[in-house]
Image (spheres, helix red, strand yellow):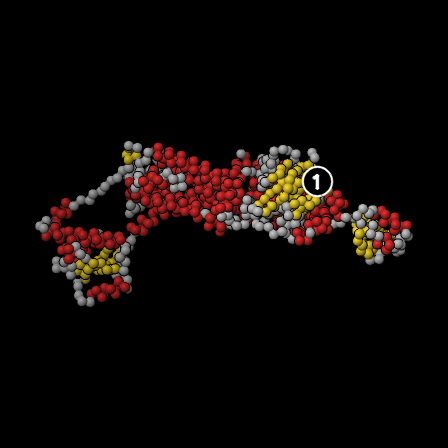
Amino acid sequence: MHKVFAIIRREFVERVRQRWFWIMALLGPVFFGAVFLLPTLLMTKSSLKHIAIVDSSRNGLGAAVAFQLDTTKIRAVLVAPGPRVADSLLQAVGAKTLDGFLLIGDALADSGKAEYRASNVSAFTTIGELQNSLQRVATQVRLTREGVDPAAIARARIQVDLATTKISGGRTTGESAAQSFSLAYFMGIILYMAILLYGINVMSSVLEEKTTRIVEVLVSSVKPFQLMLGKVIGVGAVSLFQFLIWGVAGRWVFRYRHALGADSPGADAGLFTMPHVTADTAIVFLCYFVGGFMLYSAMFAAVGAMSSNEQEARQAQQPVSMLLVVSFISMFGMLNDPGSTFSVTLSMIPFTSPIAMPVRWAAGNLPVSEVLISLAILAVSIVGVTWVAARIYRVGILMTGKRPNPKELLRWIRTA
Amino acid sequence: MASAVVQLDKITKRFAGHVAVDALSLQVPSGSIYGLLGPNGAGKSTSIRMLMHIHVPDEGTVRLFGEDGKTGRDQSARIGYLPEERGLYPKMRVIDVLVFLAEMKGVERRKARTLALQWLERLGLSDWRMRKVNELSKGMQQKVQVISTLLHDPDLLVLDEPFSGLDPVNAQVLKDTVLDLRKRGKTILLSTHIMEQAEQLCDGVCIIARGKKLVDGPLAEVKRTHGGHHVHVTFDGAPGDAERIFADPKLVKKQESTGQYAELELAAGADAQDILKGLVTSGARLAKFELAEPSLNKIFVDLVGPEAATAAARPEVARA
């Protein structure tokens, strides 16, 4: 036991001493934040667009549209229709002095038809704003035709703000749907990254001992299983230490967020407020992280043992990483409907449950019994997978030469 | 034999279709230096790994320190092992590697540290203790590895090709260390394919080829029984009746003579003393009459055969 502890300490101390550990500790949150916020930021923070409106209508629809667009990020100039107008506008778009131009006529109010020509017609925020503005003008005109007073319409108009609140265990939680979503998303990303990163850490540690041949000295004094166990626990402890640093840093940032200017105006309040992490959620997260890490690092250790250099290991680890990638990708489907058969199945299969179950937990109201069943399946699988991995490990670490094929691998497992 | 520190009894190891070690038995007496000799690929390292319980023998038993039912791993605190292929953690500090490896041998952490510092001092590596292993030269790394083998003061040292890759200076340091260890009552088992080294160091030897034992025993006995008898004669002037005596097939099997000097291989059952008597009575004046032992190298080549001296092609050990 003393020896296993020495192995754990070596793995822990050597890793925490490395520069990359502290770089990860500091930059990790920044990186996760970026992964999390960047897509939204890129979508919302677009610059002003300049377009021309070619208005061939009889009652000045163009001016009304331009007026509506004033509240958006689109600035429009009115152009009278003419035989050569389209050509000169085309040139302007080509020379990038104009982003695009809108062709409207009486058809806008009569049949709801208009045309937008631009260099970029996939910028859906721009298209959305155009569509909204045109919609409003067309509706206004048609209502006026029906004899409704535009002023009355303006008075009658009301913006509905749908507040969403998550119900958990029969109680409301004060957590909005957006917060639940971002929490689930965030946990999914962290679990995926951490299990993959630290699993691969275990693999390269095994590989290092194998390629330097130091493993021969080690297994002459400790059992291969003790060596593998010490390694997995040691690297796991490093990852938990990393989470601790992030957790403390996160608390600190949260407390001083005003001083840090984190709530600058313009940030979408719903998506960006820090979700409230309850103790239950933290426990579920940690249980599945530890379980997932044990399961995957055992597999990664076996992969390291059966390879004889970095390159081979990189190839051999692909099937294992694939399992993780599958769980990660299906997270997006699960967020849509955490209660679907698909989601439930994934949260029970041990190879996907470490990511799937915490995501479902954060996204929606889950019975504790379901979590317990899934954890039990995971625990049994860890024992089974570790048993197989340890046998591959035991034979593999002393082998040199070519990588075993599946048939040979089976023999290792049977005879080890 | 109660005093045998290592007793291998018919150990056999097979790797996918070829027998690496075939029913090898040997005994290493306590307090001696014992050489496991053989050409490359003869099964030396595999035997040593079975001794260390890194490989488990398919058949046969390994008995260490006369203890039944305890493997090399169980008794690793009493064994120092230097594997053929050296390696340390390249990114760890020298002192940390030494402490860790000593902990693996069951030495308490603080004590390991003290011992490591003493050893580094002794081998002139004190200034390097906080450096990373990969900042050290090859020779220094070898020294660190040797320290890691000796740090826990083992009773039995198992050194697999200890001199390979050492420069002459470090080879001498290691040789002195090994001799010093024997003086202190330690038992040393080393493998080598360089016979000159074995001849200088070993009290007992075991020569193996293709996994099979060819001969073993105390070095002198091996030389006596397997070398044939050789006599070197140097004349001081008159050779007397030498020519006739040397030509007697009952006495001499083979001779090489240059007039003043002759090398003789005795016939089976012949006694060198009869030749000496014959020479003296016939009036020959002798400067030197020497019962020469053949070199271990000659015995080795005779036994193994030139074709096996080059490694028998063996499939790389990729399967169990």
> Between A79 and B54, which is closer to the camera in this rendering?
B54
Q: Residue at x 36, y 48 (%)?
A: A34
Looking at the image, which residue sits at the far front?
Answer: B250
Q: Is residue A138 visible?
A: yes
Residue A379 placement, left or right of B214: left
Frontmost residue, A252 versus A99: A99
Q: Residue B27, relative to residue B197: is it above or below?
A: above
Relative depth, front residue between A240 and A294:
A294
Residue drawn 57% across the image and 36% down it: B109
At a point 88% along the width and 54% down the height, the residue shown is: B241
Q: Is residue B101 visible?
A: no
Question: How many numbered marks, from 0 up?
Answer: 1
Residue A164 position, x and y percent, is 26, 39
- Image-quadrant location for residue A292: top left
The quadrant holding residue A379 is top left
Mark 1: few/some/many CA within 10 Å (<14, 14-19, 20+):
many
Question: Residue A266: x percent and y percent?
Answer: 28, 47
SS label for mark 1: loop
Q: Position of residue A21 (x, y in %)?
A: 46, 44
In percent of width and height, residue B78 lies at 63, 36
- Decide: is A174 above or below B194: above
Residue A52 located left or right of residue B123: left
- Nearest to the observer: residue A77 or residue A234: A234
Question: What is the chain identity of the residue bearing mark 1?
Answer: B
Q: Residue at x 55, y 43 (%)?
A: A215
Q: Residue furthest left?
A: A147
Which residue is label 1 attached to?
Answer: B32
Mark 1: amino acid? Ser
Q: Along the horizontal axis of the image, is A50 left or right of A313?
A: left
